Amino acid sequence: MNSEVYTNLKKMIDVNTPIIYIHDYDFTRVDFLLKQALGGATEIREWSPALGYQRIFRDDEGFLQRDKCLNGEKTELTDVLQIWLNKTKVKTEYLLLRDIQDEIETPKVKSLLQMIAQRKLYDLDFELTIFLNSSVNVVPKEIEKYVSFLEIPYPNEYEIKDLIREHVETNGYEAFDENAIDALMPSLKGLSLFEIDRMLDMAMSSGGTLTKEDKEMILRHKKQMVKKSGVLELVDSPENIDSIGGLKNLKEYLRKKSGVIKRIGEAIKAKVAVPKGVFIVGMPGCGKSLCAKATATLFESPLLKLDMGSLMGKYQGESEKNLRQAIKIAEAAAPCILWIDEIEKAFTGVGGSEVLTRMFGYFLSWLQEKTSSVYVIATANNAANLPPELKRKGRFDEIFYVDLPKEEERKQIFEVHLRKRDKHGINISDALVKATDGFNGADIESVVNEAVEDCFVNNQTFTDSVLLDFAKKTVSISKSCKTQIDEMNKIFKESNFKTA
């Protein structure tokens, strides 16, 4: 495990922290973390709903063992806490409370934890440190000020390689090919050691060795695991940059950035600044989401989509914790793309909501200071409600404005959609291009889809004139939403965003 974790844990203990919260489902890993950080000879008392009150110790061979405390009687949590609180003197003791997310909400447990924490702070003869360990993060407001959270990061590249070598040695497999390991590394990053171990077992069971072909299998399972987090989605990105009609400036910009991201190791050594990300604002249906998906293919990186609505929790501090967790997963999976769609909806109300203000502040600080190769793509339709702090230089490398496509761009968009439907060689006439003035990309796609469908149903030959007929029947977004679009155009021009 990362040595920084041990260092942070020791610091928390040294500064007299009453309660240390370890949010992790791998209890065995937490056991070894505590024994390693506290010293091999140290005994730890543990309470859990399943096993009651126990003592954790090392046997003569160095293995962790448990036995019952208090003559083997199963003691309730309130009784255990009361026993410790009643002690006249406590000299450097540790109490691990595991899976108490249900009990911690009861008034008596909250009150006892409060009193123990206060005594730890003000009584020099009371040196009890409490560890809370659970896969569910629940900290009542009454004890929040006494709690420090220990972050356990996802394993880095060196730790993953150590695990792979240990896995090979333990199971008696032949050594894995180093090139295969390097090829799989981006897929394995962002998983816990426990999850990586499972992936290795599945890879070995399917082929008897680790190969580059296992990447698809690992990505399928990684997608499920990321989905279980509830805050991120691993998005498949079959699109490529050539699937986008128009947006010449934006596409050239992204191609340049891809040269850095795909060679990030070399770039860092050459003192090239790690790209932060791009903010794309503009008309709906003009390819902003498509850009995010195509960029993932261009960068050869996984695409993680952040659902800002799913971050909001009902417990004190839960929303901020969810945001930290999402960023933690993204940074562990780097190099990757973090896509935040319709970001203006997420931060509407900043200033009027204490929770949103804290989340927004944390997000901006991370954007400003991040050094990881997480490339952020934020998209927004409505620039009117964007907080000014989000548009400041330093948050994103560049902000692009996507306007309704011009004549040449509309022609390119038609060509893209006709290629997708195997309608090669169809002439895109000037009349068709002019007839679609004020259309966005979604309007043009709709025209092509309807024309293809109509010709199929009526057994007609697909021609340019059929496209023109449907274009004349289509009510474009510039007509159906004229007032909103005029207002958006005004805001975009006043903001001096770069034209995509």
Image (tube, rainbow, N blue to C red):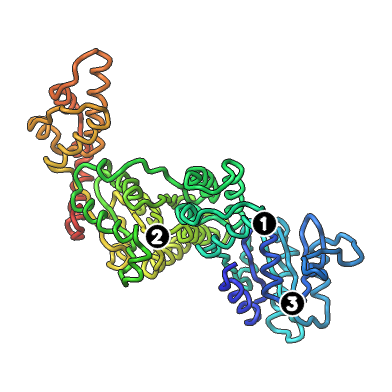
Gap between marks 2 and 3, in whole Å? Answer: 40 Å
| Residue 252 visible in the displayed image | yes
Q: Check contact, mark 2 vs mark 3: CB within 8 A.
A: no
| Lower sequence index among marks 2 and 3 | 3
Farthest residue, direction front: 174
Q: Is residue 308 above or below residue 468?
A: below
Q: Is 443 in front, or is 360?
A: 443
Callout 3 crowding tier (Cα within 10 Å): few <14, some 14–19, many ≥20: many
- Dividing the picture into quarters, in which one does residue 142 lie? bottom right
Query: Does residue 295 appear to the left or right of 106 in the view shown?
Result: left
What amino acid type is highlighted by mark number 1? Thr
Which residue is at the far right?
71
Point out residue 104 in the picture as x, y percentages from the top left corner: 70, 61
Pointer 3 residue: 128
Task: Tell me the residue that label 2 is attached to.
Answer: 374
Of circles 2 and 1, the one toward us is 1
Please give the name of the residue rendered at 34% of the width and 57% of the height, measured from the top-left corner.
262
Closer to the chain start, of discs 2 and 1, is 1
Q: Residue furthest top?
A: 459
User: Is disc 1 placed on a helix, strand or loop?
Assistant: helix
Q: Which residue is mark 1?
A: 170
> For this view, does 62 lie left or right of residue 282?
right
Circles 2 and 1 in contact, beta carbons < 8 Å:
no
- If the image is split into quadrants, where does the N terminus sit? bottom right
Nearer the observer, 283 or 3: 3
Give the camera-side residue of 144 and 219: 219
